[in-house]
Amino acid sequence: MPLLPVKWNRGNLSYGKSVSLESNFDRRTQLRWLRLQDNYQSINISSLLITSHNFTRKKLIYKCEAVCGGLGDRFRGIVTCFILALVSDRQFMIEITNAFDVKNYLLPKMYNWTTNNKSLNSNVSRKIIHSINSDPSLQNEIRNTNFIETWSKYDIIDIYTNIDYVSDIFQNSLVQKNKIMKMFLDNLPMEQLTLHNLFPLFFEILFQPNLEIVNALEPILQIIENGYTLTCIHLRMGKNPSNPLDAVFQGRASAVNDILDYLNRTKLRSKQNTRIFVASDSQQALSNVFAQFQNQMILVPGPILHIDQLTNTVNVSHGFLKLLVEFYLLGECDTSILTPSGLSGLANRRRIDPYHNLFKYDDLNRRIERCHDVYEYENPPKSSSVLLYCRVVFNCSSRQL
């Protein structure tokens, strides 16, 4: 039988309470935060935080009310908007009403991003920006104009986006004297001021999981504490019977067999101290891996969903819990084999060492490639459309095995 985390049990949980200092999750979070402190020791973290709501302060709100992409898309938009809020000296808030309310699953950690009616008085001036999937005009504004000054006449900026504008922000010479910009630019090289590098820092500042998610993670993290290594596989297959409304990915049909072939060549089945965690948008893909590695597999129970492509048959609450547990687990791997996906690409950035045993599936050439930090070999990639974004998220110089 596969190794399973605990089942959801909402009745025994208290939302919003801090995690026990004795938990595996807390210990690993502390290790992660120590790494981030080492990486960003020259950054004054306290200057990025607010301790309570200032109801008269100007605001920038990340909003998602209709189509805004999957979880990876939303995290990408949230971090972009958070940085825009920091550099424009605005209170940052998150308001997601499409498919789920983020506050039911992820809680504020060091920065209170929650919205409330008192702080959002209707008698204010607002600027609404829609930038889903592609928006050259907004990219030009953020990269080449003094958008801080242009936006200053508005009390509230509402932004709907799933695009990475982080490099564009830092490369804008017209706003580089801003105190937040200057702090980052004076202490970090420009090539490190990208979404993929800054994501783990800002994610930890913004979010902590509720106790339901932590309780589901605990038994798997205990396996790691007991000395087992965790090999993670993310199979993003696109449109399939488990995910019927998604886009078709032409090169993914062979992904499962090719990855299984690679696992068998590495003799993973004979490594008794290894456990295999598999996440996928396809039940068939999960079943195929389970058929070969059932005694080593870890699965997270719950329905499969794409949060921007929901069907009427899916239990959204359990499906989203499953998705978040999988996202957190993909940050705890000793080895990661990933199909191109914004979700797993960003989750991988949370690993203590993101490039340790990192492999991606090249669906054009049907091969597994080992990833190395692209900055060891070439200039950083430019911002790109969502469709081309996976390369930027991985941000790796691949070497064929």
Image (spheres, rainbow, N blue to C red):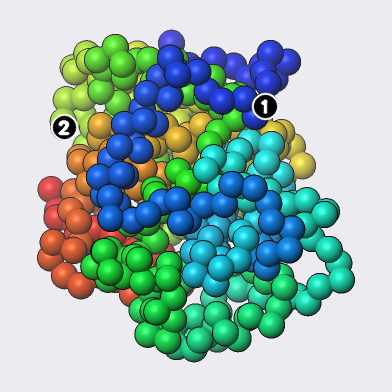
Q: Residues within 10 Å of mark 1 (few under 14, many from 20)?
A: some
Q: In this view, does 322 lie above or below 140?
A: above
Q: Which residue lies furthest to the right in this view?
A: 123
Please state which amino acid type lies under the numbered disc 1.
Tyr
Residue at the spot x=36%, y=43% of the render?
350
Secondary structure type for disc 1? loop
User: Which label's residue is closer to the chain start, 1 or 2?
Assistant: 1
Q: Pinpoint residue 317: horizontal percent, then vertical percent.
A: 69, 34
Q: From the viewer's perspective, is residue 302 above or below residue 123?
A: above
> Can residue 258 be seen by looking at this rendering?
no
Q: In this view, does 19 lie to the left or right of 308?
A: left
Residue 165 drawn at (x, y percent): 46, 71
Q: Residues at badges 1 and 2 in contact (C-beta under 8 Å)?
A: no
397 up-or-down from 97: above or below: below
Which of the pair 19/388 is nearer the observer? 19
Q: How crowded is mark 2: few (under 14 residues within 10 Å), some or many (20 or more)?
A: few
- Write down the residue under mark 1: 15
Task: Tell me the residue that label 2 is attached to.
Answer: 265
Image-quadrant location for residue 319: top right
